[in-house]
Amino acid sequence: MALIECVPNVSEGRRLDVVDTLAGAVSSVDGVRLLDRSSDSDHNRSVLTFAGDASAVHQAVMALFEAAVGRIDLRRHTGAHPRLGAVDVVPFVPLGATTMAACVELAKQTGAAVAARFDVPVFLYEEAASTPARRNLADIRRGEFEGLVTKLASSDWAPDYGPSRPHPTAGATVIGARRPLIAFNVNLATDRIETAKAVAAAVRESSGGLPFVKALGIALPDRGIVQVSMNLTNFERTSIVRAFGTVREEAERRGALVVESEIVGLVPEAALPPAPIQTLQLARFSKEQVLEERWKAMEREESGRS
């Protein structure tokens, strides 16, 4: 079977009953395995990871929107992470022998269907982008939900599908196809947001830092610390070890120590160093966060029930 991984990010990380409902909607689709879910109250964001063939994954995304659009109101949403939609971003990732072209086609099919059924503007990004200016998720999301009316009114930002106005509560969404991405955060022992932002600027590719690294400086007020929140978009070119080491060096130059790091969601086995918990000061990490291990575990569970 040609498998596709889907890793939607939704703008809800505090009302776990709502997240339960969203995860249940995905799990209800035959042929889909929900591999992982994680929620962050500071970011007010959750990440679901599931996989299946193209048809099943498409149906699961539609079920996710059905559950999310009526339950997430961005007019009342606050959180540290940038967002423009209730279902903020939906990437499709090829697994095994699946081609990127198949994921691009699925992104276009799903984007058109989401816009038609839910009246939500849809932008295509990364490998599915309709123009080079739309490859980068950060460029699409700039201005966030609050800036969508102005953004969508510009001819440069007409959506790829759907109306040129935001959904009143669900905003817009970004759907695309990409390589495996590692969501990797490093927490610093300081409450100075300026330090986190300076370290993020030193690390991210767009401001002269490491190739294939996107980074933001974020405050975690409940903990009294700050975070460098990164997306590693090509771990073969910039490893997680290199990203961690660079953040640590840049933080120490500014008088801040690393408290811990965390991987959000799943990570390919090939991306991890030996002894990853010690090497990366990882918190709350288990082998079930390794994509291949999680898939095998679910196969065993299903085999045991049959």
Image (cartoon, helix red, strand yellow):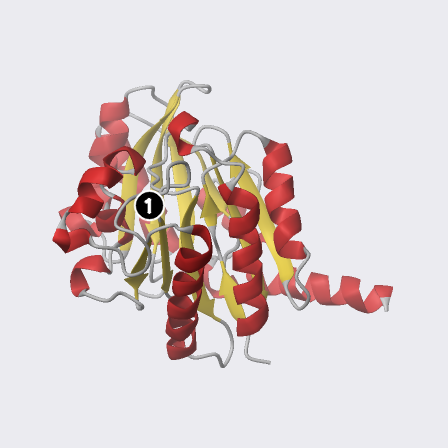
- Where's residue 242, x and y in %? 32, 52
Amino acid on which the number 1 mark rests in the picture: Gly
Q: Quadrant of residue 32?
A: bottom right
Is residue 140 visible in the rendered image? The answer is yes
- Where's residue 226, x and y in %? 35, 26
Q: Is residue 63 above or below residue 280?
A: below
| In the foreground, 54 or 303 | 54
Q: Quadrant of residue 159?
A: bottom left
Provide the secondary structure element on which disc 1 rests: helix
Residue at x-position 39% and y-position 74%: 105
Is residue 78 visible in the rendered image? The answer is no
| In the foreground, 277 or 185 | 185
| In the foreground, 249 or 282 | 282
Q: Is residue 257 above or below residue 244?
A: above
Q: Residues within 10 Å of mark 1 (few under 14, many from 20)?
A: some
- Where's residue 94, x and y in %? 46, 72
Q: Quadrant of residue 56?
A: bottom right
**Left or right, residue 244 beside residue 197:** right
Q: Is residue 91 above or below residue 264?
A: below
- Residue at the disc numbered 1: 245
Residue at x-position 57% and y-position 30%: 15
